[in-house]
Each structure stands twice: as structure tokens, then as C-alpha cells.
Image: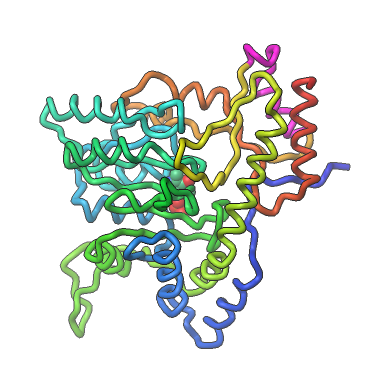
């Protein structure tokens, strides 16, 4: 018989979610607005210390609305971290704009400030100044925001900060998602907290957030009839999903602590194992450790590769994931410009995400560890 499945990152309810959902039913706020939507937005503002938040149907819609508000349109250039999930880049193409992919640096695996600046200089020399940039805090590890923001302000390019994987992460106590002009959060099913599906936009600017709410509810002008002077979208979060979100916000800090302790467990367990390495927090950074990832260097493991581990985990009924395949290597995106030196490609080749959910038990973690140690014969 198969051993029970160990999941990579499954939803983990706190207990109060159903109360908020029940209240929505009891008061008949089964609608794409209502007290839970307002409440979740207030919770997000309080937690991230941003000024304003709009709860939306997904993180992807938050990126799309950000690009629209920044005036990104056909033929415009948008700088985007290559090493990410496709949802960071897809909305650029929705707008008919051109993504320019930037490689990772080795310290945080996120957008390389060096290649970012090189791309800006080369594009500007051709009169193609980028309209926006999208750095990502991948796997919840904060990017080098100080460098990225100083490049952004030097060249006056607005930043859409993709913090979809990084709710609960911060740099010097400042929440990820609050560095750029616009910050993106996701509450998809496998993220650190979930609303089953959903996202949010956070910003210092009330104007952006009001505009996002307007665009996300079909862009209805204030008139007694249905009057439209903009193209609208149906991107608001439902009051039911927001109820789940309010319950999840109550346990967010516990979830971060649990994921960080999973990371510590793996890191300590592999401390003396040659050829297995992790991405570290920079000094002052605090990672939510959404997923714990390892790099497997076959030159140091006696020839054992990521693939050997993957095959064994599968046999043991343990869910795993490769690291994100960089966007500049994707069939749909490979025709677009790329600036880099192959760092993200190497991460993709050697990397593996381990089960990291906040609901894993100690014996789950031990099972994962034993499976990998068996492959490595350590
Ligand atoms: C999940 C994710 C998104 C998109 O969020 P959805 O809510 O799934 O639309 C965007 N960027 C990154 C890096 C993500 O991991």
C-alpha cells in the first residue's frame, strides 16, 4: 500500500474562517463587496503597515491593474524578474507590452540590480525607456530592494512589487510589498495563507487604490445609469472569500513561524551534508519561508542529482516541485529580450522545493529527510 501523501503546501485553516463566512451568509452579503472585504483590507493595511489596500480576485489581476494604472500599453517595455511564476509576466502581454527579462543574483535568487541597470541603460540608449519594473520576492525571500529602489528612482521608473509569495516577509521591519509604488499579494490555495483564490493590491497612494477598486468593478462612472468612460474588469474579491481571508489573517504569524521552523529543520538536518545548499536571508531581511528550496550540486554529492532525489520523493508519495523555470526559457516568452548570465537557469537545473506547509507534522518532515538522505547515502 502507498504511504500517505505528503503535500508541498496545502491550505491550513485556523478555525475562525467559517465564522466570518457564516456571518456573510446570515447577513446575505453573498456579493463581490461587503463587510468581510472591507475587514480584510483593513487587516492587510494593519499587518503590512501600508496605507491602503484593495482586495481582488487574484494576484494576477492585481499585477494587471497595476500595469493599467501606470499607463502600460502596446509596444511599451516592462522589466520583469525572469526567475518567477508566469503570472508575474503574463499581464505585461495582456497589455500588448513587451517584457524584458532580468536574471537573478546569487544571494537572494531575485532580480539582479546589476542586470536591471544594464537593461535600463541599453533600452534608454535606443529611446525605449521602460514604463515599469516587476521585482519578485521569490519563495518569500526578500529581494535586494534597497538597490532596486535606488535604480528605480535614479531612472524614475515605477515599481510593481510582486510580493505574492512574501506576505509576512520584511526588510528592516518594513513589509515586502510596501517598497514599490504598488505591491501585489496572492491568497491562492498554496500560498502562505489562502482565501481559496484571491489577491490584493497595497499602496501608499489612495488614488491608485481607489482607481483599482473602480477598474475592478467594471469601471462604472458615478451616474444613475450605467455609464462608462473606461474599460472595466471584474476583478474584485467576493465577500465569501474575504471571510476566509479574515480568519486566515488571525493565524498568519503562526503560519510564518511554522514555515520558518520547517526551514530550520531542513537546514540543520543538511548542515553537514556536502552538496546541499539553501538560499539565505540577507542581514536585516526576514523571510516567511513560504517554500524551502534546496540546490543539489552533483559535483559535491558524489554524482547524485536533483533528478535522483525527485524520483525517490515520487516513489515515497512525497510531493515536490522543481524551482520555477525562468521566463526567458519558456516557449511563449523566449522571443523577448533577456539580460543575465545564466544564474536563474542554473538554479532551475539544480533546485527542488521540499514539502513546506505549515500543517506538516514532525514525522512528515522526518519522512522527507529520510527519503533524501537515502538517495545521498548519508
Ligand atoms: C501566485 C503568484 C502570482 C499570482 O497570484 P494568483 O493569486 O495565483 O493570481 C504572481 N506572482 C507570483 C510570484 C506568484 O507566486
Instruction: Please tell me which residue lies in front, 330 or 270.
Output: 270
On the picture, is 224 further left or further right than 145? left
- What colour scheme does the image use? rainbow
Residue furthest to the bottom in view is: 27
Residue furthest to the right in view is: 1
- Residue name at image x 46 percent, y 42 percent: 285
Q: In what quadrant of the picture does the C terminus appear? A: top right
Q: Which residues are magenta?
A: 298-315
- Residue name at image x 41 percent, y 53 percent: 175
Q: Is residue 313 magenta?
A: yes
Q: Position of residue 71 (x, y in %)?
A: 18, 51
Give above or below for 187 relative to 319. Answer: below
Instruction: Please tell me which residue lies in front, 317 or 11.
Output: 11
Q: Position of residue 79 (x, y in %)?
A: 28, 36
Report the label total.
Answer: 0
Residue 203 picture quarter: bottom left
Give above or below for 100 relative to 66. Answer: above
On the picture, is 158 further left or further right than 138? left
Amino acid at each position: 500500500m502507498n504511504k500517505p501523501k505528503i503535500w508541498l503546501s496545502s491550505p491550513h485553516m485556523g478555525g475562525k474562517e467559517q465564522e466570518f463566512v457564516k456571518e456573510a451568509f446570515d447577513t446575505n452579503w453573498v456579493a463581490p463587496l461587503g463587510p468581510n472585504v472591507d475587514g480584510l483590507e483593513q487587516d492587510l493595511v494593519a499587518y503590512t503597515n501600508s496605507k491602503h489596500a484593495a482586495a481582488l480576485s487574484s494576484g494576477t489581476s492585481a499585477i494587471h491593474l497595476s500595469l493599467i494604472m501606470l499607463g502600460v500599453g502596446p509596444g511599451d517595455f516592462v522589466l520583469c524578474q525572469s526567475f518567477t511564476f508566469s503570472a508575474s509576466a503574463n499581464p505585461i502581454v495582456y497589455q500588448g507590452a513587451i517584457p524584458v527579462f532580468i536574471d537573478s543574483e546569487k544571494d537572494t535568487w531575485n532580480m539582479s540590480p546589476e542586470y536591471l541597470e544594464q537593461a535600463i541603460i541599453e533600452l534608454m540608449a535606443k529611446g525605449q525607456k521602460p514604463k515599469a519594473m516587476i521585482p519578485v520576492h521569490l519563495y518569500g525571500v526578500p529581494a535586494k530592494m534597497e538597490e532596486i529602489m535606488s535604480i528605480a528612482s535614479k531612472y524614475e521608473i515605477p515599481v510593481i512589487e510582486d510580493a505574492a509569495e512574501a506576505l509576512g516577509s520584511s526588510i528592516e521591519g518594513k513589509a515586502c510589498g510596501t517598497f514599490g509604488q504598488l505591491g501585489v499579494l496572492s491568497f491562492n490555495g498554496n500560498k502562505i495563507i489562502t482565501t481559496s483564490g484571491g489577491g490584493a493590491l497595497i499602496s501608499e497612494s489612495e488614488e491608485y487604490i481607489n482607481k483599482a477598486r473602480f477598474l475592478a468593478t467594471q469601471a462604472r462612472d458615478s451616474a444613475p445609469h450605467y455609464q462608462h468612460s473606461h474599460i472595466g474588469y471584474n476583478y474584485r474579491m467576493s465577500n465569501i472569500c474575504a471571510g476566509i481571508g479574515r480568519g486566515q489573517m488571525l493565524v498568519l504569524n503562526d503560519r510564518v513561524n511554522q514555515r520558518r521552523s520547517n526551514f530550520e529543520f531542513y537546514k540543520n538536518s543538511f548542515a553537514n551534508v556536502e552538496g546541499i545548499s539553501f538560499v539565505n536571508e540577507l542581514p536585516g531581511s526576514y523571510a516567511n519561508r513560504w517554500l524551502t528550496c534546496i540546490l543539489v550540486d552533483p559535483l559535491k554529492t558524489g554524482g547524485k542529482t536533483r533528478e535522483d532525489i525527485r524520483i525517490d520523493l515520487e516513489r515515497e508519495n512525497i510531493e515536490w516541485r522543481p524551482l520555477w523555470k525562468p521566463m526567458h526559457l519558456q516557449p511563449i516568452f523566449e522571443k523577448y529580450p533577456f539580460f543575465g548570465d545564466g544564474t536563474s537557469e542554473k538554479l532551475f537545473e539544480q533546485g527542488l522545493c521540499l514539502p513546506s506547509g505549515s500543517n506538516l507534522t514532525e514525522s512528515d518532515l522526518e519522512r522527507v529527510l529520510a527519503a533524501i538522505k537515502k538517495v545521498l547515502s548519508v
